[in-house]
Image (cartoon, helix red, strand yellow):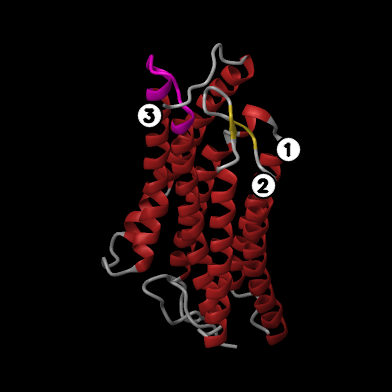
Amino acid sequence: MPVSFPCPRPRESIRGCRLDTFTTAGAVALLCWEICITFDDELKYIWPKPNSSLLKWLFLFHRYFALCAQLSFRIACLSMFNTSTPITLHMCKVFWICQAAAAQSLMLSIDIILMMRVYYLYNRKRWMGILLFSIFSTGHITQGISAVHAFSRLHYHPVCLVIRLPHSLVYYRFAVTITHLIILGLTAWKHVFALFGGWGSTPILSLMLRDGILMFVIIGFMSIFSMVRKGAFGNHIFWWFLSIVSSFGCRVIINMQRLRTLKPSEPAEFTTECDGLGTGRAES
């Protein structure tokens, strides 16, 4: 027999649900606005690519999977709360597992993009490929185990808002932070090496370093926010996470494609492509 929540619903839950609704609308609006202002770039750089291009599918996944996920979760949420059927604990678990799977899929995709750029930055060295694959595998396996362990210990309000996060999620945050810290460190090391070699001011290195720092800041801010904001009001960070990571991933790909239009005389020396990713081998 399904376990339902007691009534009446706590006032904090209702306020948190309303805030979650407003936050969702804002996050979806941000995502739609981002799609509109970069749609010309999408038509110019992405759609002409062949269907065999990994870049094309990574971009489309980042852009439209996040939008579909946002809308689907909102519709599911409204459907649950606008019926007379009691909300069960099982419904809440399934709802949050689906949200976590969507967020983790975007994180996995952005890690692939950033790591492949680093791989080509280091001239596709075999040891670098092994290192990055090991970091990627270890990081996401740790995140998966931590998430599964945490979801069995989540506590919910009657409106499916998470009111307390288990301490085991610290391992998840640690794995995410270390992964992106290593990506940032490898990019920064190459940048320092390039500065001494006289080609550290190339647009591609500056762009990669900037993107690495920005992603690290995004992950850090959202991790801190989710820990500081207690109760029902910390839940709406999920909606912004989907929109921000989706927009960031698309911007990374578009910016890399823009650099490919540089003239040969300009100092962006990435010449070998990787399935259309727009990155290549740096001459050192």
Q: Could you tell me which secondary element the residue under label 1 belongs to?
A: helix
- Residue 41 seen from this side: no
Looking at this view, name the residue that lies furthest to the front.
1
> Does 83 lie within the magenta span?
yes
Compared to residue 120, the image places residue 249 above or below, namely above
Kindly identify the amino acid type of the residue bearing the numbered disc 3: Ile
* Residue 283 location (% of width, % of height): 55, 87
Residue 47: quadrant of the picture: bottom left
Q: Which of 201 and 181 is in front in this view?
A: 181
Image marks 3 and 1: residues in contact by CB distance under 8 Å = no
Q: Nearer the viewer, residue 84 or 258?
A: 84
Kindly identify the amino acid type of the residue bearing the numbered disc 1: Val
Identify the disc placed on residue 223.
2
Q: Nearer the viewer, residue 199 or 22?
A: 22
Residue at 48% over, 69% down = 259
Residue at 69% over, 77% down = 189
Kindly identify the amino acid type of the residue bearing the numbered disc 2: Ser
Q: Mark 3 points at which residue?
A: 75
The quarter of the rendered structure image containing the N terminus is top left
Category of crowding for the residue at label 3, using alpha-carbon neighbours closer than 10 angstroms: few (below 14), some (14–19), many (at least 20): few
* Residue 230 location (% of width, % of height): 70, 32
Category of crowding for the residue at label 2, using alpha-carbon neighbours closer than 10 angstroms: few (below 14), some (14–19), many (at least 20): some
Residue at 62% over, 58% down = 176
Identify the disc placed on residue 205.
none
- In three-dimensional space, the C-alpha distance between marks 1 and 2, rounded to whole angstroms, equals 9 Å
